[in-house]
Structures are given as C-alpha cells and as structure tokens.
Image (cartoon, rainbow, N blue to C red):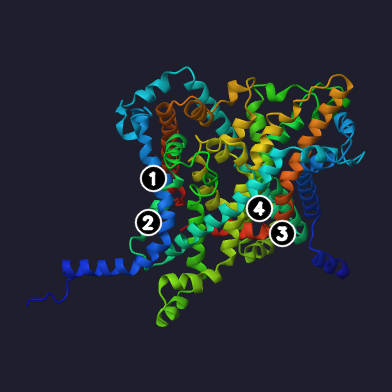
Amino acid sequence: MQATIRKSNKVRRSKGDVIFDTVVYIITGLMILIAIYPMYFILIASISDPALVSSGEIVLIPNGFNLRAYEKLAEFDDIWTGYRNTILYVIGGTAITLAVNIPASFALSRKQLFGKRVLMAMYLIPMFFTGGLIPTYMVVKAVNLVDNPLVMILPFSVASYYIIVGRTFFQNTIPEELWEAAQLDGCGQVRYFFIVALPLSKAVLAVIALWSAVGQWNGYFNALIYLRSPEFQPIQIALRNILINNQMMGMTQIGAAAVEARQLAELIKYASIVVSSLPIMLLYPFVQKYFNNGIMLGSVKG
Amino acid sequence: MHANGFAISAKEKKSRRLLLLKRSVPLYLLILPSLILLIVFTYIPMYGVTIAFKDYKTGLGIFGSEWVGFKNFTTFFNSYQFWPILRNTLVISIYSIVVMFPLPILVALICSQITSSRYKKFFQVTTYLPHFISTVVMCGMIMLFLSPSSGIIAKLLSFVGIDMPNLMGSASAFPHIYVWTEAWQHIGWDSILYIAALSSIDPTLYEAATIDGANKWHKIFHIDIPSLLPTIMIMLILRMGSVMSVGFEKVYLLQNSLNNATSEIIATYVYKMGLLKSQYSLSAAIGLFNNVINLILLLVFNFISAKISEDSLF
C-alpha cells in the first residue's frame, strides 16, 4: 500500500497526462513532416531519374541517381551571373545596411541627443506611411539609379526595424557607466561609439547582418522594378525565368526526345531550387539563435 | 543688474539649448548618412505623392504638372476594375488574417507542451525552415507540386483514380492556394514571439497551479493564454494596420490569365498601371488610397485596443 503511494508520487503522471503527451508528440511530429517533406522531395527528385520522377515513382527515396539536371543547369549562364550578382549584392548591401543603421541607432539611443524625439519619429513614420511605389520609382529614376546595380544596395538600406532593434540593444546592454568613464578620459561620442560601444555590439551586428543578407538573397522585387539589363540581375530573377516563365522549356525536339526533354526540364527546375536555396538552408540551423535574439530585441517596446 | 534669481531667463534658456545642440553635433554626424538616405528615398517620395492630385506630364515634372484635385481618385473609383481589385485584396487579406493570426498562437501553445528540450529545439528549427525559402522558389514549388500533368500530387491522386484539376488555372482556388501555402511557409516562424512570451512565464505559477490540482488543460487556459494576451493584442493591431497591403511579390508570380479574376489586387494593379502603362498619377492615387486606408485602420484598432485592454502601440 505504502509502496504504491510512493510510486505514484514519484511518477506524478496521471493517465490523462500520458495521453496528452502522446497527442502532443503525434501533432508536433506531423507538423515537422509537413514542414520538411516538400523540401526533401525537391532534393531527392533533383538527383533521380527524370522518367521516374515524372511517373510519380519517387516519393521517399531517390532512385536512378544522376546529376544531369545539374549539368544542364550549369550550362545556363543566367544562373551563374545571377549567383555572382547576388553574392555581390549580399556583401555590399549588408555592409551598407550596417554602416548606416548601426551608428544611427547608437546615436538615437543616447539621451544626450538633442531633438531625439523628433528624429526618432522621422525613423518610425515610414513604418506606417510611405509614398508608395510610383513616387519612389520617380525619385530613384531622378537620381539615375534605374538600371544601376547600386539601386540594389543603397537606397533602401535604412530600415525602421533595424533602427529600433539597434537602439533597444544599445539602451539595454551597454551600461551608462562606461560612457561616464570614457568621458573622464576625454573621449567624445564618436570615439566612444567606435572604441567602446561597437566592440560590445557583435550580437546586434550579427542579427542585422543576417536579416539583411537573407533579404538580399531572397529578394526579387527591387530587381524587377529597377533593373533592366540582364547582366545586373540577381539569382532570384534568373530563377523566376526558369521556374515561373518556363524559359528552359524552349526545346524543339519531337516524339520521344521531346518527352524526355520535358521531363528533364522539370528536373532542372528542382535542381535550380536546390542550388539557390541550399546556402541559406545549410547555414540557417547554425545561426538561428541570432535570429531568435533579434526577434526579442525588436519586440521590446521603445 | 536685477538678475532674476529663480526663473531662467529666455536668453539663458536659448543659450542652454544652443549648448545642448552643440554637444549633440558628433551624434548628428553618426546619424547623417542614414538621414540623407531616409530623406531622399522615403520623405521625398512622400512629397512626390502629390502627383496623385496632379496630371503628371514627364516634360513638366512633379512641380510643373497641373493640379487636378481628386480627379485621379474618381477615375479609379469609377473604373470597372475598382470593385473587383478591392474585393480581391480584401478577400486574400482577411482570409490570410483568419488563418495566419491564430495558428502561430496554437503552434506556440503546442510547442510549449513539449517536455524534452532537445526535441523542442528540433521542432523549432524544422518548422522555422520554410520561412527562409524565397518567394520565387516558393511560387515555383507551388506550380511544380500543383501541376495537373507532372506534379507529384496529381501522380499520387491518379494512383487512387482521382483526376487532379488545374488549380493554378482556377480563379476560385487562388485565394486558398495563396493563403495555405503562406501558412505552410510562415506559421512556424510567426510563432517565435509567442514561444518566447510563453517561456518567460514565471515557473512558480505552474508549480502553484499543480499544487492546487490543475491539470495541463487548466494551465493552458488559466496561465498560458492570459499571459499571451498583451502580445496577441499588439500583433493584432499591427496586422490590422496592413489589411489593405497584400504582398505584391507572391501574388504577382502566381498570377496568370486564368486566375486573374481573383488574383488582381491593388498592389499588382498599381505596378501594371504605373510602371508598365506609365499612368503615374493614376497609380500614385491608387497607392495613396491604399496607404491612407491602412493608416486609418491602424489608428482605429490602436484606439480600440487602448480602450479595452490598455495595450497599444502609442
């Protein structure tokens, strides 16, 4: 009798709890499957035999391993140009984003800043009201940035959200005593920023750099609106031409060769998805804690 | 000689301000680059929105073009396109909110029930992953999967003898495709904020509840959900403030002549009228109309929320 009481005290899980936990595991397991399977399918389809993919026989494991789709894709120059351009835009865009947003958010976090409220309002208003596409396009055109690769990295680098995140970070994590000490040593605000605050803000630099890099990698809107020349197009535009506009379908064979070509064209689509998404997918699990930190910084009401 | 001992004179006040201003100069230097970009590419376009009230002629420029009052707006309201695109925008947007707003909360509540911390982490990493797929790739995937001739879904259905309809070519299917693929891609990611809010709840609350005999359901309804309410309110206000802004990118990529009846929204219409047909004034007016409604909705919801729950943006 005593033994049973002690046992039930120790386990402390009622039958209801066991059922509850089981249901939680089943539901979350299904959600993981739903999230992962489409991506997994694309990966296995891209390395399988085109005819088997086309007949619906590739479901769980790859079959008829081959890299023909990737070889064909490699002959497609737009992908390479796009890849190179995107890498340049990611590097340039991220550098400019950090260079303009971080010093500004530092300055906006300083209580010594005269006119702080007005300035902060100037950075926040665009979250709620903007001029819209057409007036923005006209300004970009007026400063000769249409069809200029600079349009991908410069005009839209200031972001209210990054300013809020940066400001919250500087306000909450850098103790004011450091400024007082620096001031005694004759240090001004600019030097204080570069020598004291900046080295302490790697976390927020990482967050904003990652957001900006992912945005650059995945974005196609600015390129669609502002770029014309094929040699400036980022990878997403090349992908759009393959995936949405079916540019690879322009093959003229007939009969059996045509069927095969069509099946391969489908596979090239899968391969292009893998090639363009892999860098981010592989990198993401290692950097995800920075993203989470960033979300938390941004959600603090300021 | 009759210096005032207590009140600061206007002159002194002015010089104090000047001193503060002078001391802030280094900080202004840090702000300057971003401020220039902000003014040129955000505030000048805000002024440029005045072309919505003008008859813009390229030769005359923004300043030189003639004022026409609300003519562009009435042209838009009276065009046969007005009601369909307004309806399509609202259908997609409200449908998105109905699906996309509650589900992340549910995901967070389920996630917080996971007892193993390693499995919880795995769950989070995998459900966040689709968020990082680009819009172009996402739309490519939708078309590949839904293709009635070569898509995997069609193949699997044909094994059980069902014919796959051409969903991409169906106007009635478009809102469902848009919203549910959006849900697949972003629900996990959107739950981050709620998961964080749940993990910051004081654990002693749960211990006290256990002692009082509460089971897991009691804890969800009496601890978890009430703790999430402030976050939910803020997110709802923000979301309502963008009811009229359905993202351009995905809709534009999924659009085709067959589903156009439900897929033409304000953003895609502005793009086509403005940049493809060069009707600058008219499309600026449509964009402005859209922005103003969003702003009004945001203010209204902020006001309502401040009244009933004391959670507001400003």
From the viewer's perspective, tell me whether residue A95 is left or right of residue B6: right
Marks 4 and 3, how far apart in space?
31 Å
Circle 3 marks a residue in which chain? A
* Outermost residue toward the top in this view: B80
Which mark is in front, 4 or 3? 3
Between disc 1 and disc 4, whose residue precedes? 1
* Viewer-proximal residue among A110 and B98: A110
Q: Helix, strand, or loop for circle 1? A: helix
Q: Return the residue at label 4.
A: B220
Residue A230 location, x and y as percent?
A: 62, 37
Circle 4 marks a residue in which chain? B
Q: Return the residue at label 3.
A: A286
Marks 1 and 3, how far apart in space?
38 Å
Which mark is in front, 1 or 3? 1
Amino acid type indicated by mark 1: Tyr
Residue B102 at least partly seen: yes
